[in-house]
Image: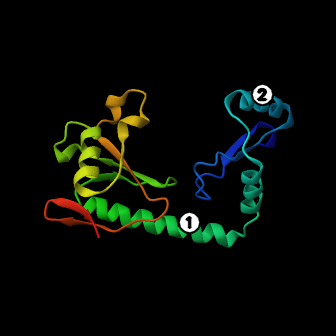
C-alpha cells in the first residue's frame, strides 16, 4: 500500500500544542512535489524551534503514548458521566478530545444562546456546534466540550451545572 498511501499528521493533539501548526506528510515520492506545492500556497513555514521540538516529541517512548491515551480516556469518561448526569445527550468520541452534546432538551433557542448562558451563569465554556457545520442550522442543537488539558469536576446544583 506504500505507493497508494498518503499520511497527513500533526503534533497538535497528541502533544497538546494545538497552536503550533507543526505536522508532516508521508507519501510516495511521485506525490510529494505536488503536496509541497499545495502546502506552499496554504501555509507559512513553522518556526525552526517548533520543528525541533516536534523531532524530540516523535522520539518519545511508547510509554508516553500509553500514558497519554489513559489520561485522555479518564478525562473523557469523567466528562461524559458528568454531562449525562446533568441531562445532556452526548456523542461518545473515539479519537477526539472533545464531546459533542445535544442541548435540545434544555429549552434554549439555539447553541449560541445556550453557550452564552453557560459562560455567564455557570462559568463553564463550550463551543457552539453550529461553528462546525457549513449550514449552521445543522449544528444549532449541539455544543462542544473540550477535555484536552486540565479539567474541573462538574456537578448539578439544583437545576444548575456548576464547577467544584
Question: Who's the residue at 30% across and 64% down the image?
Answer: 82
**How many numbered badges does the structure rendering display?**
2
Dividing the picture into quadrants, the one containing residue 32 is: top right
- Report the disc number at residue 69: 1
Foreground of the two, 110 or 7? 110
SS type, badge 2: helix
In the rendered image, the vertical position of residue 51 relative to residue 57, given as above or below: above
Q: Which residue is mark 2?
A: 37
Question: Who's the residue at 41% across and 32% down the image?
Answer: 133
- Report the disc number at residue 107: none
Dividing the picture into quadrants, the one containing residue 129 is: top left
Question: Who's the residue at 72% across and 52% down the image?
Answer: 50
SS type, badge 1: helix
For disc 2, the neighbor class at 10 Å (few under 14, some 14 to 19, many from 20) is few
Of the 4 image quadrants, the one containing the N terminus is top right
User: How far apart are the alpha carbons under marks 2 and 1?
Assistant: 34 Å
Q: Position of residue 108 (x, y in %)?
A: 19, 41
Of the 4 image quadrants, the one containing the C terminus is bottom left
Foreground of the two, 9 or 47? 47
Q: Position of residue 142 (x, y in %)?
A: 32, 42
Foreground of the two, 104 or 128? 128
For disc 1, the neighbor class at 10 Å (few under 14, some 14 to 19, many from 20) is few
Amino acid at each position: 500500500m506504500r505507493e497508494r498511501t498518503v499520511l497527513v499528521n500533526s503534533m497538535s493533539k497528541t502533544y497538546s500544542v494545538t497552536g503550533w501548526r507543526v505536522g508532516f506528510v508521508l507519501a510516495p515520492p511521485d506525490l510529494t512535489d505536488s503536496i509541497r506545492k499545495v502546502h506552499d500556497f496554504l501555509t507559512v513555514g513553522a518556526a525552526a524551534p517548533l520543528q525541533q521540538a516536534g523531532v524530540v516529541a516523535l522520539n518519545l517512548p511508547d510509554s508516553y503514548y500509553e500514558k497519554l491515551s489513559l489520561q485522555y480516556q479518564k478525562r473523557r469518561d469523567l466528562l461524559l458521566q458528568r454531562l449525562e448526569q446533568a441531562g445532556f445527550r452526548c456523542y461518545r468520541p473515539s479519537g477526539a478530545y472533545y464531546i459533542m452534546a445535544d442541548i435540545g432538551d434544555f429549552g434554549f433557542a439555539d447553541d449560541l444562546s445556550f453557550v452564552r448562558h453557560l459562560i455567564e451563569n455557570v462559568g463553564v465554556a463550550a463551543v457552539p456546534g453550529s461553528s462546525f457545520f457549513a449550514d449552521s442550522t445543522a449544528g444549532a442543537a449541539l455544543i462542544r466540550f473540550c477535555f484536552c488539558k486540565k479539567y474541573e469536576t462538574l456537578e448539578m446544583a439544583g437545576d444548575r451545572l456548576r464547577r467544584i
